[in-house]
Image (tube, rainbow, N blue to C red):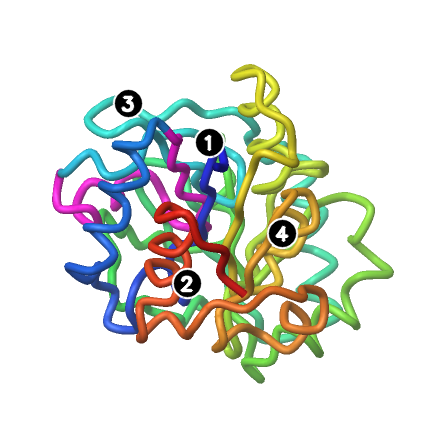
Amino acid sequence: MPKVVATDLDGTLLHSDVTLSARTKAALRTVKAAGTRVVAATARPARVIDELFGGEALIDLAICGNGSNLYRLGEEPEILHPLPLDVARKVIEEITTIVPGSGFAVETGQRVLFEPGYQYRPALDYRREFVESVADLLTEPFVKLMVWLPDSDPDRAWERLRPAIGELIECTWSAERAPLEIGAAGVSKAATLAALCEGWGVTADEVVAFGDAPNDLPMLAWAGTAYAVANAHPAVLAATSLRAPANDADGVAVVLEELFSGGRAR
């Protein structure tokens, strides 16, 4: 039986309407009752976690901002890895030159600041504040820089940007037509999960992970057992051998039910 279950949220644990099904809630209760830790690993900020889980302690903690901070239900977020402002400034300059028309926003952990060029509006978002210019984004520490792309193709944009900024930062995206999400170099869901597990005395072989998007790939590669949901990005499907049903079919719950009833999901 695994000692840790780590799961992405959007496109994996959550339905496409950003809800948690009754079946999934029941599966998480079963996992926790067995003494296994449940870790949510998400690009989302800490401030939305309580609402997503309805205030119920279905997880032990959340790795938020793609590994930049930790959140325990009902507590203040713990910022681990802010993006250095000088690096952010350089990255914005390069992106503006290479992909003209891009827009920017920053996630502080408590709020999101948008400049006028950032045109992406997530369905679930809180504490948005609009600023007048890109320079106004760079006045306080933040954990994530988000980049709206004029052609809405993160795969193609990153191929153009990687030679210029790839060594300065970590860049991920959660879905097709989603913004780029940029964090400090070396920061990922995988790195933060590995550090947590080391502190708990848990090895990678004792971890089961679930994901759907490119930002889940390092975590899925690190975990001893890794499942891609059926609706996953092609790169994730290509990198994993185990499959869970799609997120809207309660795929994570289906696998957890089998794992924690003595069976073995495929």
* Mark 3 closeness class: few <14, some 14–19, many ≥20 residues within 10 Å: few
Which residue is depicted at the point 24% across and 39% down? 58
Q: Is residue 46 above or below residue 70?
A: below
Between the C-alphas of marks 2 and 4, the distance is 13 Å
Q: Find numbered disc 4 in the image and state the secondary structure of the residue it sits on.
A: helix
Please say if the residues under marks 3 and 4 sit with CB atoms less than 8 Å apart: no
Q: Is residue 39 above or below residue 216?
A: above
Question: Which amino acid type is marked by label 3?
Answer: Glu
The numbered mark at residue 16 is none
Picture quadrant where residue 158 is located: bottom right
Q: Which residues are magenta?
A: 36-55
Residue with the mark numbered 1: 69
Give the mark, 4 or 1, whose residue is nearer the N terminus. 1
* Mark 2 closeness class: few <14, some 14–19, many ≥20 residues within 10 Å: many
Between the C-alphas of marks 3 and 1, the distance is 10 Å
Residue 178 visible at all: no
In this view, the mark in front (3 or 4): 4
Residue with the mark numbered 4: 220
As drawn, which residue projects farthest toward the right? 163
Q: Nearer the viewer, residue 137 or 214?
A: 214
Q: Is residue 179 left or right of residue 235?
A: left
